[in-house]
Image (tube, rainbow, N blue to C red):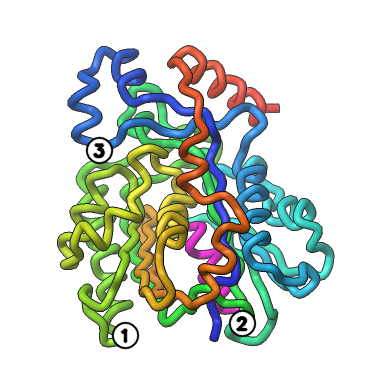
Amino acid sequence: MIGIVGYGCYIPWRRIKIEEIALMWKQDPILMKSSLKLNEKTVPDIDEDSVTIAVEAARNALKRSEINLKEIGAIYVGSESKPYAVKPSATIVAEALNITPQIHAADFEFACKGGSEGVFVAYSIVKAGLSKFAIGIGSDTSQGAPKDALEYTASAGGAAFIIGNENVLAEILETYSFTTDTPDFWRRDGQFYPMHTGPFTGEKAYFRHIYNSALGCMKKLGLTPKDINYAVFHQPNGSFPRRVAKMLGFTPEQFEPGIIVTNIGNTYSGCSLLGLCAVLDIAKPGDTILLTSFGSGAGSDSFIFKLTERINKVRQNAPTLNEMLQKKKYISYSEYSYLKAKIYMRREE
């Protein structure tokens, strides 16, 4: 049995409400909230970046894993907002976790599915027998240009998963990936804010890739949506994951527990993984979970998990996502702009 032996997440406690952004740009706050199906999003402080978020998420995952640190042989960090253009984030995280030097480390980037890539490779390393345990992390402090649609959704947060062949709380039954060259979203080297192509964003990119990836994963096991207890999808907003879930034949009871974007925003590489954390916080032994990520450019990774009895034993070893959601402080748009400016200046140093 190979699967998740520990999971953890972290989100900043600062929040900004969608209406605060809308009023700044003289846009209708009710329309923006209803169209995006978002209420608020997380905002990182000047001392929070994708590395510090990854460290906090991984520490929470370790609390639930109850394993020997020296048996972790690999760590992978997925992010599109890494602090250094040329310096790995994974080495910093590994050092902070005290799991160096005998470890394989690497960074991954595939827009919003860098985190699921890390989990996939961690799973592959363990399955190949190269390591007893490996860590996959998705973490971002995502960017959205002022007044752009992305400003309403781009947020910060991350999740970490320790994969192994002992102490498994969620067995990985199957994986499946669907990838094409579809340029719906990109950011060139040196640019601070990303660009997006409206006509490609929906049907050709997000919906096509998630639909085919999720369907392909279920078909490999001979399953249908009726055999799945929970379904989690990448969440660029609150509308897209609900629509694709219904396209695949899932009911609100199956997909609503994993939709976390409403009060967090789109954490890019951490987004679908945070949705998985939300489900692991409430699911029961024996439940099956479908996770399907999405990364612009474009690709989608799917996993099907089956929970074991161990989930009930270790769940409370670390804060749940819901507990983190309760700790928050709302800030104004001027405070939000100040933090963004300070973060930008730090990146330029």
Q: What is the secondary structure assignment of the residue under circle 3?
A: loop
Residue 212, image x, y percentages: 25, 70
- Compared across the picture, whether 231 is left or right of 325 comes to left
Location of residue 187 in the rendering, given as x and y in whole percent from the top left corner = 45, 41
Q: Which residue is mark 2?
A: 165
SS at mark 1 in the image: helix
In which quadrant will I find the C terminus?
top right
Mark toward the viewer: 2 or 1? 2
Q: Is residue 120 magenta?
A: yes
- What residue range appears in magenta? 114-125
- What residue is shown with label 1? 220
Horizontal side of 37 relative to 168 (left or right) equals left
Which residue occupies 23% across, 17% down?
27
Badge 3, how many Cα within 10 Å: few under 14, some, many 20+? some
How many angstroms separate mark 3 from mark 1 (CA)?
Answer: 33 Å
Which residue is depicted at the point 59% across and 26% down?
Answer: 344
- Amino acid type of the residue tagged 1 in the rendering: Lys
Q: Residue at x 45, y 62 (%)?
A: 280
| Residue to which mark 3 is pinned | 37
Label 1 crowding class (10 Å Cα cut-off): few <14, some 14-19, many 20+?
Answer: few
Instruction: Kindly tell me whether residue 276 is visible in this rendering.
Output: yes
Quadrant containing the N terminus is: bottom right
Please determine whether, in this image, residue 322 is positioned above or below residue 152.
below
* Residue 142 visible: no
Q: Nearer the viewer, mark 3 or mark 1?
A: 3
- Is residue 295 rendered to the left or right of residue 222? right
Residue 180 placement (x, y as % from top left) = 33, 65
> Which amino acid is tagged 2?
Asn
